[in-house]
Amino acid sequence: MATWQCIKQCGACCNLDPAERPDIEEYLSAAELEIYFSMVGEGGWCVNFDHTTRECRIYPNRPRFCRVETEIFQDMYGIEPEDLDDFAIDCCRQQIEGVYGDRSLEMLRFDKAVGL
Ligand code: SF4
Ligand code: SF4
């Protein structure tokens, strides 16, 4: 069974382009939407994303919706804990495909890391 993990030097999910996330209003509260939109910078990239290191500059304080955690995913998307791995893997693959492409190094590294 594939197990979700975040790979280093990716950051695909830190591209927040609202055009690529049409359902966003369904799973974020009004307050969270305000935070989300305030973070959208050039090219859709989060203003907190460091393009050199490809890391989050505010990682310990990142918003709830940036966290892959059982309780948060249950609350935001109605995903049961046993389905979290598959769901999170799909989310990452979608983001990686949209940002870097489905044959990108990031996709290859991700698939290998999660055991696909
Ligand atoms: S898309 Fe997935 S693997 Fe890439 S940075 Fe985000 S959580 Fe990590
Ligand atoms: S706050 Fe950090 S983890 Fe969240 S989208 Fe921005 S750079 Fe990525």
Image (spheres, grey):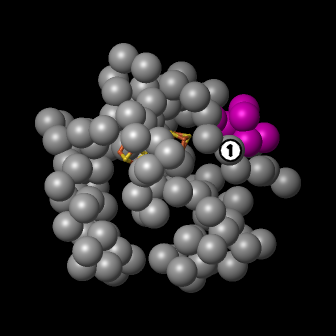
Q: Main secondary structure of the magenta part?
A: helix
**Structural crowding at the residue carrying mark 1, measured as other residues with C-alpha within 10 Å and reported as few (<14), some (14–19) or many (≥20):** some
Q: Is residue 16 left or right of residue 97?
A: left
Question: Residue 28 placed where, x, y %?
Answer: 34, 74
**Residue 107 vs residue 53, the one in the foreground:** 53
Residue drawn at x 30%, y 38% is 48
Q: Nearest the camera: 86 or 51?
A: 51
On screen, residue 31 above or below 87: below
Going by the numbered disc 1, the residue's amino acid type is: Gln
Q: Residue furthest right?
A: 1
Q: Is residue 49 above or below residue 81?
A: above
- Outermost residue on the top side: it is 52
Which residue corresponds to mark 1?
5
Residue 72 shown in magenta: no
Identify the residue at image location x=20%, y=67%: 34
Please give the range of residues in magenta: 110-115
Q: Find residue 51 and report its image quarter.
A: top left
Quadrant the C terminus occupies:
top right
Q: Ligand 2 quadrant?
A: top left
**Is label 1's Cβ within 8 Å of ligand 1?**
yes
Work out whether 96 lies above or below 100. Answer: below
Q: Is residue 25 visible?
A: no
